[in-house]
Amino acid sequence: MAQAAERYMQGIAVPESAVRPGEFFARTRRKLGLEYNKTYAGLGAQDVVEIKKTDILSELTVRFVGTLTVTPGTGAVATTRRWPYDLLKKIRFTANGQSNLINVSGLKLKVHQFMRHGDLTDRGVSQSIAGSTVTQGTLAKSSESWGVGSGATAIAAGTYDVDLEWVIPVSEDQVDLMGAIFCATSSTDLSLMLDWATPAELFALTGNGAAALAGKVQVLAKRFSIPMADGTIIVPDLSQFHSLIEISKGDGLGLGANEIYLTGQGAGKTLIRLFSQVWNNNVPLPVTDANFGRLAWRYSGNETPDEIESGALMRQLNEKYYNTDIGKVWGFFSHEYAQENAFRDTVDLGTTAEFRQIIEIAAGVALSNPRVEYVAESIFVAGS
């Protein structure tokens, strides 16, 4: 008896007859369940989360819940602008031999959640940032608690509740499950690593001032069951991976136009979003005309499809896309290729050689140890 032909999806062999997206979506069942619930490893340490090998994995949500205890003593305690969301310095997810499918900081994941969900908004959610009360552009949800503000100074002694959330988009789309991971096999290899920031990255302490963070980390998984028909599993097309990779560059960044080359170009990869921040003197640079000129992307010799002439114009464009002001206090700006029509606008990195973004920093900006931190979000076929 002839065996059914096989095909490989994300490095996993499945019968050709099993790939029936229409039938899968008619018969699958969404599942939400807690994967991990333990005391967090501590500042400067790492939690490694074992992901169960079952069903099809589409999303992970990380939650930190605990307390921040501030003891100024005879000194003082302040927070840096990395607080609170870069409490997770790096979130790394690997699967089936593809290292670092997700490799970004907590703040980048936070803004990405708003980018993916235009109906999600932070409008009216008050937070203290650099000593001012901000009600738009915080990236906070009302169910969260920062404990203390970002860039806060002279924090009073006390114990403050902290409750933070980050969403890891294993799948690029939670409807068609593009990039979701087939887990129901012993050959599946999954790893989630949570790298916590060091105290110096989150707090500025003087004298004998101290800040102690205690709490637990929880990981919630969203999965989809794998139905069977006539003894055969039924799955959607899982031939592609979804990736979010953060790159930080500081060498050569200066006033005027800076050309930042995209790392990781290649055939088989499709760019769906590119978003960036410029950090100046350890503070994100707000996206205004006073700080930025042209923000563009370019490939080949001088092909420049998108050329936004000022920071304020880019900020307005992004707010229209994402329903939140990502450039106001966190200094994000984004080249968006999927929000309106992904089929039409995404960028084939196999045909756009020498891809780079243009970041023009205005002449009046006083630069001090500037760095650009950007995230490339892409879809690619396993093995490319």
Image (cartoon, grey):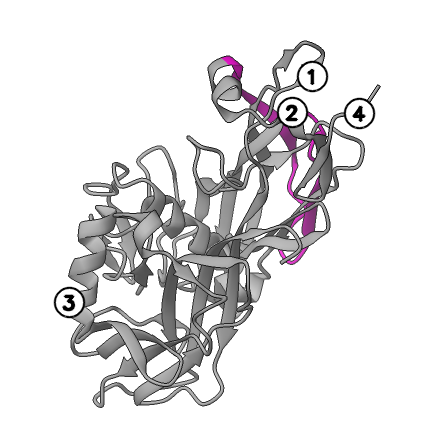
Return the x and y of residue 236 as percentages of the image width and height.
55, 29
User: What residue is pinned by disc 2?
Assistant: 17
Q: Amino acid at mark 1?
A: Thr
Kindly report the distance in space between the C-alpha atoms of the residues bearing marks 4 and 2. Answer: 11 Å
Q: Nearer the viewer, residue 279 or 266?
A: 266
Return the x and y of residue 295 as percentages of the image width and height.
26, 74
Position of 33 with respect to 174 (left or right) is right
Residue 232 has which mark?
Answer: 1
Along the polypeptide, which appears first: circle 2 or circle 3?
Answer: 2
SS under mark 3:
helix
SS under mark 2:
helix
Please state the extent of the stretch shown in magenta in the rendering: 27-55
Kindly report the distance in space between the C-alpha atoms of the residues bearing marks 1 and 3. Answer: 53 Å
Mark 2 in CB contact with mark 1 (< 8 angstroms): yes
Return the x and y of residue 334 as percentages of the image width and height.
31, 62
Residue 288 has which mark?
Answer: none
